[in-house]
Every structure is written in C-alpha cells, then in structure tokens.
Amino acid sequence: MLAPNPRFIRDFDWLSFLLIIGLMAFGIVQIHSAKPNDSSLWRKQIVAMVLGLIVMFIVTKMDYNRIFGLAPYLYGLGIFLLILVLLFGETINGNKNWLKLGPLGGMQPSELAKIFTLMMLVRFFSDVRERPLRLKTIFTAGLIWIVPTVLVYLEGDTGSTLSYISFFVVLLFVCGLRWSWILAGFAVVILAGYLAIPSIKNSTSYKAERIKAVYWPELAAKRYRYQNEQSYIAIGSGGPYGKGIGSGTQGPLGFVPEVHSDFIFTIAGEETGFLGCSLALGAYLVIIWRLVQTAQQSRDREGTLLAAGYTGLLLYHVAISVGMVLGLLPIMGIPLPLMSHGGTSILATLFALGLCLSVRLRRFVN
C-alpha cells in the first residue's frame, strides 16, 4: 500500500503538498521567534508535523471511500471525546476544551470532532439525490450536526462552534438548498445582528467586550482592547519587508498574549512584513483553489462533498484567524491551520488534507 507507483507520482498534487510543507515550516520558524526561550514549543510542533505527514501520506494512499466506511465510528469517537472534555477537561482562557494526557501533553478534541462530523455529514448527503433538499433531509442532517456542535458550544468555545457551522452551510448549499431559504437565512442573520447591537453595547460580558474592542473600542474595557492594540502595533511595525526573522519584539517580550498559537500571524507580520504575510496568504489561497478543483473533478459525490466541505472549513479558519490579527473581527481563539502551535490542530488538518488529496489522486479512476 505504501510503495510508490507511477500513477501516484503523476497524479499526486505536488503543488499543494509543497505549499503545506512550506506553511508548516514557516509556522515553526515563527513559533521559535514568538517564544525563543521555550524550545519545547517548536520541538513539539515538529513532532506533530512529522506524525501528521505520516498520517496524511497513509490516508492519501488509501481509497477515501474505504475510509468513509469508518465515518460512523469516528463520529461516535468524536462525540465520546467531547463528552469527556465536559466531564474531565481542563479550562484554559475561559474555555473548557482540553484533555490532559499525562506526559503526552494535551489534546483538543473539538479539532478532531469537526473533521469526523464533516465525514459523517458527507456520508449522509452522498446518498441524497433530491434537489432541492427536502425539510426532512435537512432535519436529519441537522441532528447529525447539532450534537457535536452543542457539545463544543457548552465548552465555551465560540470560535470552534462557528467553524462547525461553516462546513454545514457549504454542504447544504452544494447539495441543493433552495435559494429562497438561503436568502431568508441571510436576512435573519443580518436582522438578528442589527437587533443585537444595543444589547452588545450595554453588556459587560466577556464575549460582548471582545466584540466592542473591535467595533466600538471606546465602549470596551481597557483590558479587552489590549491584545488588539498590541497586535496592530506589531503588524504595523513590520512595514513592507518586516524587521527580520528573530528580530520581533511584541511577541518575544510578551506584549501579545497567545502569540505562538492564535496570534501567530502577528509575528509573521512583524518579522516578515507585508511581503511575508502576502506570500503566506497566497499559499493558503492556492491550496483552497486546488480544493475547489478537487471538488469539481471528483469521480463521485462523496469526494465532491468532502472537498467542498473542507474548503469551507479551511477558508473559515484562515479568514477568522487573520481577521482577528488585523482587527477586522473579534478575538475568538481560532488557530491558523498549519502555522499555529497545536498538535491536535496539525494532525486534524493533515488528516483532512490527506482525504482531499486522496480524492484528487483518484479523480481519473473509473
């Protein structure tokens, strides 16, 4: 199974693979710059990267249809892990979303569960042929989706909860949701947001303060504006070409909290400037473009839905993570895929990308 063959070498998506390697290598450099006195962080990241690449390679070599046969069991495993988090998880930065594994460190089950939930929804929708979707079908899919989503919400992790919405909405759209329902959904979201503005402005809750820190900073408490302001300073000080690798100050000196994980793009902006950030974003865009191609060229509905759903999830993560750093969106604790520190995120991302590479590799197989 693992022996290379001419078809694999010819049809494998080498461009995406090289970009994935490049983004992870860039992330390791930035993690080292963010925490130069803590070598354990970048060393753990390298270990997770190597393990993740092995998983990605094995998954790519396997027929994705065989792996989808395990979707119900993986989905059940994800639910089980999320329940364990609620019962025995550790609370970090207000979110109870980590499981301690002794000497192995910790894991964030919500990262794995979102991929398993995506797989389960893809398996369900792959047998659905009706267009437009009936309410019964949407309701059944919603039951699959709502259980892990509610469990993640109960952990207090708003950013991850919204990430579950991202791929569910994409799957509904691709499978044939009525345009009238789509437009009605947008209208409801916009109206709800507009009606919520007075409540947000008058609220002193943690989440409301995070929102005010971006859109109404004069109303937010100073301690909630701090991380945003320090991020702006770091990004702005990078200029066109940056200060140089290892020459940043905002992260290494502790001005930007969580700079090695959720705010890794801040270090990239400070040390490599507009040029480095543009190259990184360009790499993400090319990977997303290749995923869209994979969805279009897939040999079957299962592959199309998988690639489309993960495109939505990856795009969400990149947009939210970068938007937080640039002050366009509230801080939600979303890691930047492939670059942010976090073994679970790396493994989940490479597993999902391996599935998508498997779809692309077999696009010409009858």
Image: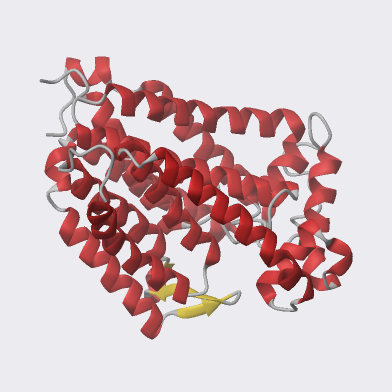
In the rendered image, the quadrant that contains the N terminus is top left
- Return the x and y of residue 247 as percentages of the image width and height: 79, 44
Q: Is residue 73 visible?
A: yes
Q: Is residue 221 above or below residue 15?
A: below
- Return the x and y of residue 225 as percentages of the image width and height: 81, 65
Q: Is residue 33 visible?
A: no
As drawn, is 197 to the left or to the right of 59? right
**Near-viewer residue (355 or 342):** 355
Figure colour scheme = secondary structure
As drawn, is 312 to the left or to the right of 186? left
Which residue corresponds to the image point at 78% horizontal and 63% vertical from the top-left? Answer: 213
As drawn, is 48 to the left or to the right of 278? left
Which residue corresponds to the image point at 49% horizontal and 51% vertical from the top-left? Answer: 185
Pick out the residue farthest to the front: 180
As drawn, is 102 to the left or to the right of 94? left
Q: Is residue 215 above or below residue 103?
A: above
The image shows a total of numbered marks equal to 0
Q: Quadrant of residue 250?
A: bottom right
**Near-viewer residue (57 or 75):** 75
- Return the x and y of residue 124 as percentages of the image width and height: 19, 50
